[in-house]
Image: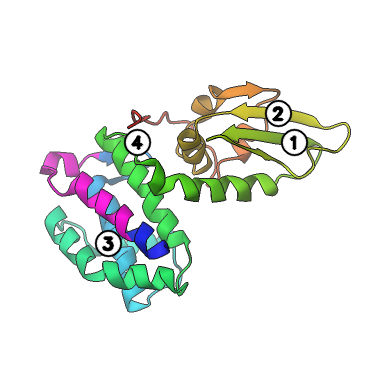
């Protein structure tokens, strides 16, 4: 299952970037403004190469990630895709066998969204990211403790923070599209964008507390649904 999800995510990324002209592959990615489209692709390829070679010390950390980009500086998209093709099976197998964390898959799916949004492509397909989104929402919501509680309604599902049934709580309820929630939790939506979700009750401290990589203030592109 994890292997299939990785292969299909990789195939969708390839479809997004394989025919890009240089000016488009050199476009800055709004969600990762230090990177171009080509840099982001270099990171995904570098991840697969490192997983294949079992160079996973520091996995997902900033130095590990930066090394992928630096090592492939100036490499064109076709060459990057050819390198990825050599490592996709080993990476998928490592995920399936749980020899690497599932965050390797999560990272691919988050960056698929980054690429789609930066290139003006439609929202990635529901079956590519929805299960990962649901796991992330559940993890974030179950970690909320205390008098301020949160109810999240998205994608036909409701999640409640553990203390929501306690007396004298201050409850906030947010109803939002699951894709937008997923992107917001992954720090891919600005504070103002998250404030525009459908809130009942206080939006603070949730605007700053929910994004797992911290809040941001730069408005992000929102892709049209498929």
Task: Mark 1 or mark 4: name the one nearer the start of the chain.
Answer: 4
The residue where tag 4 is placed is 123
The residue where tag 1 is placed is 149
Instruction: Name the disc covering residue 50, or none.
Output: none
Q: Residue at x 15, y 49 (%)?
A: 18
Task: Mark 2 or mark 3: name the one nearer the start of the chain.
Answer: 3
Q: Residue at x 77, y 35 (%)?
A: 148
Q: Which residues are magenta?
A: 7-27
Looking at the picture, the colour scheme in use is rainbow
Question: In the image, is residue 201 part of the stretch drawn in magenta?
Answer: no
The quadrant of the image that shows the N terminus is: bottom left
- Is residue 33 among the parts visible in the rendering? no
Question: In the image, is residue 20 part of the stretch drawn in magenta?
Answer: yes
Instruction: Name the disc covering residue 45, or none.
Output: 3
Element under disc 1:
strand
- Is residue 101 among the parts visible in the rendering? yes
């Amino acid at each position: 299952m994890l292997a299939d999800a990785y292969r299909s995510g990789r195939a969708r990324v390839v479809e997004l970037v394989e025919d890009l002209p240089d000016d488009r592959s050199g476009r800055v990615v709004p969600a990762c403004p230090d990177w171009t489209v080509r840099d982001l692709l270099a990171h995904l390829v570098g991840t697969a190469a490192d997983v294949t070679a079992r160079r996973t010390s520091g996995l997902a950390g900033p130095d590990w990630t930066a090394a992928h980009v630096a090592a492939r500086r100036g490499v064109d998209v076709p060459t990057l895709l050819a390198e990825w093709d050599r490592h996709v099976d080993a990476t998928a197998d490592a995920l399936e066998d749980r020899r690497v964390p599932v965050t390797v898959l999560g990272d691919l799916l988050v960056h698929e969204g980054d690429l789609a949004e930066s290139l003006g492509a439609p929202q990635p397909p529901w079956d590519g990211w929805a299960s990962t989104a649901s796991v992330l929402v559940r993890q974030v919501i179950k970690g909320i403790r205390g008098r301020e509680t949160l109810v999240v309604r998205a994608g036909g599902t409701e999640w409640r923070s553990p203390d929501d049934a306690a007396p004298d709580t201050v409850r906030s309820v947010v109803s939002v599209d699951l894709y937008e929630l997923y992107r917001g939790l992954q720090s891919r939506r600005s504070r103002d964008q998250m404030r525009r979700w459908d809130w009942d009750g206080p939006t603070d401290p949730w605007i700053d507390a929910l994004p797992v990589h911290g809040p941001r203030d730069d408005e992000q592109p929102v892709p049209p649904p498929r």
